[in-house]
Amino acid sequence: MNHNFQRKRRNEKSKGVRFAVPFFLLPLALCLCAGPARGQNGVTCDSVGATSRGRGGTNLAHSDNGAIVLDNPAGMANLDSSGLLEFGVEGLITDVHYSDPLNSTTNKIRPEALPEISYIRKSPGGDWAFGLGLFAPAGFGAEYHINNQVFGRQQYESFGALGKILPAISYKLTDQLSIGGSFGVGLSTVQLEGPFHLQTGAVAGVPVLLHTHGTEAAPVWSVGMQYQLCDRTTVGAAYTEESRFNLGGKLDASVAGLGPAPVYSRFDSQINIVWPRSVGVGFTHLLTERQRLSTDVYWFDWSSAFNNVGLRLTNASNPLFPALLGPTIRDQFPLHWHDTVSVRLGYEFLLTPCDVLRAGYVYDSPAVPSATLSPYIPGILQHTFSLGYGRQWENWRFNIAYQYNFSPTQHVSQSALVGGDFNNSDIRAQVHWLFMSVSRRF
């Protein structure tokens, strides 16, 4: 939609234009794997883009920004112009505090920035729309210095990210109903550094100081619909399939307990990780000609995705390990996360035909059980407040948004992780986000 909330209904059919996709944008997908930690609803974002973020992440029933390529591609056919090109950037500062009987430390605070790009073009007549987007909708990360009972003071560092390159298509079946879908490539990377106790089998309880990383691509897809109930109300729904990755890479390990000093070896590694499927339903309603209310509700299947993270090690550089444990070492890092529900509320007020104010709130039900909570994946943020502002100059639009995420302190009494490193520990977190985007309609 335009900042003028009524323009969509005055432009049901766009003028005929030539369709062209800017494939020169594809190399920029490499930027996605540099993404920072994502803190809401476990480790997924509540949304992407300054427009959606300003109104609490609501986007399923909207068609006024490039992030609909990711959130609900059905909205592309309802765009208020013949096409859109949008560039955005997200910046964040994280603050995670961890404490146990030996430690009281704060995650290293490092500002991060991440680009997002989207392009949408409608066909002559406006019934079809085609899009391409580059997004990073999920991730986690942390970095501390913690005193470990076996290895002494060590750096604990984790990083995981999911990026998506998404071609998308949308079709307007009737004046009220549109459908859409996306099918593209997901890029995932995971890195882990620090002390770790092997968790399963004959090696359970063995303390290891490790550094591992892995990267892989896999197919990703989603489908969605939008339906205009009346002039003032639109509903939307979307399903995003889970993304499974077997991340190939290397692992360096120093294993304690096999001699007077830790024994080192390098391995070929494979990390099995799944980013969850989700289902969302939302609506947007014009309260008045100058006020709009939006609500989205999502369900995330964390119990299937983050039940555990698998690890497979082969080709040890030290012959001691295959002699003792065989040519392949397998382990699983238990997570046992719960399915979650995310409730998002957004409000917009049209100050002038060219200026809009936004506000929102998000509640994410807890995903991480205390028994498997660790400083490596502190995905415990539950509450989000947001503010946003948008300005239009002819065909150009500028949007800015701020979000503040925070969590209650979560306590671990007796950790279910082998080794007992995180017994009697506490974790709390907060994140400050700033979002900006510039878009041009044509």
Image (tube, helix red, strand yellow):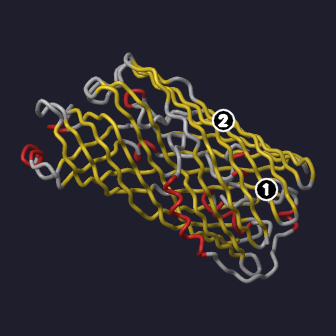
What residue does disc 2 label? 404
Q: Residue extending furthest right?
A: 352
Crowding around mark 1 (Cα neighbors within 10 Å: few <14, some 14 to 19, many 20+) is: many
Dot 2: element:
strand
Image coordinates of residue 135 in percent, x first then y, are 57, 58
Position of 8 with respect to 294 (left or right) is: right
| Contact check, label 2 and label 1, Cβ < 8 Å | no
Query: Above or below — where is 79 with respect to 341?
Result: below
Please state the horizontal and vertical placement of residue 391, each as a whole percent of the image: 84, 54
| Left or right placement of residue 388 versus residue 307 in this view | right
Q: Quadrant of the C terminus?
A: bottom right
Q: Residue 383 lies in what quarter of the image?
A: top right
Question: Which element type, helix, strand or loop, lies under badge 1?
Answer: strand
As measured in the structure, the alpha-carbon distance from the residue carrying label 2 to the one carrying label 1 is 21 Å
N-terminal of the pair, mark 2 or mark 1, is 1
Look at 52% across and 23% down and name the residue there: 409
Position of residue 279 in the picture relative to residue 152 (left or right): right
Give amino acid for label 1: Phe
Image height check: is 14 above or below 370? Answer: below
**Could you say where residue 140 lies in the image, as x and y percent from the top left?**
48, 43
Which mark, residue 409? none
Q: Nearer the viewer, residue 176 or 295?
A: 295
Q: What is the residue that sits farthest to the top in this orientation? A: 101
Q: Residue furthest left?
A: 323
Viewer-nearest residue: 206 or 144: 144
Above or below, 299 relative to 97:
below
In the rendered structure, which amino acid carries the disc numbered 2?
A: Tyr
Q: Nearer the viewer, residue 283 or 263?
A: 263
Q: Position of residue 83 (x, y in %)?
A: 74, 71
Q: Is residue 299 left or right of residue 54?
A: left
Rendered image: mark on residue 398: 1
Tell me the quadrant of the picture where the N terminus can be found.
Answer: bottom right
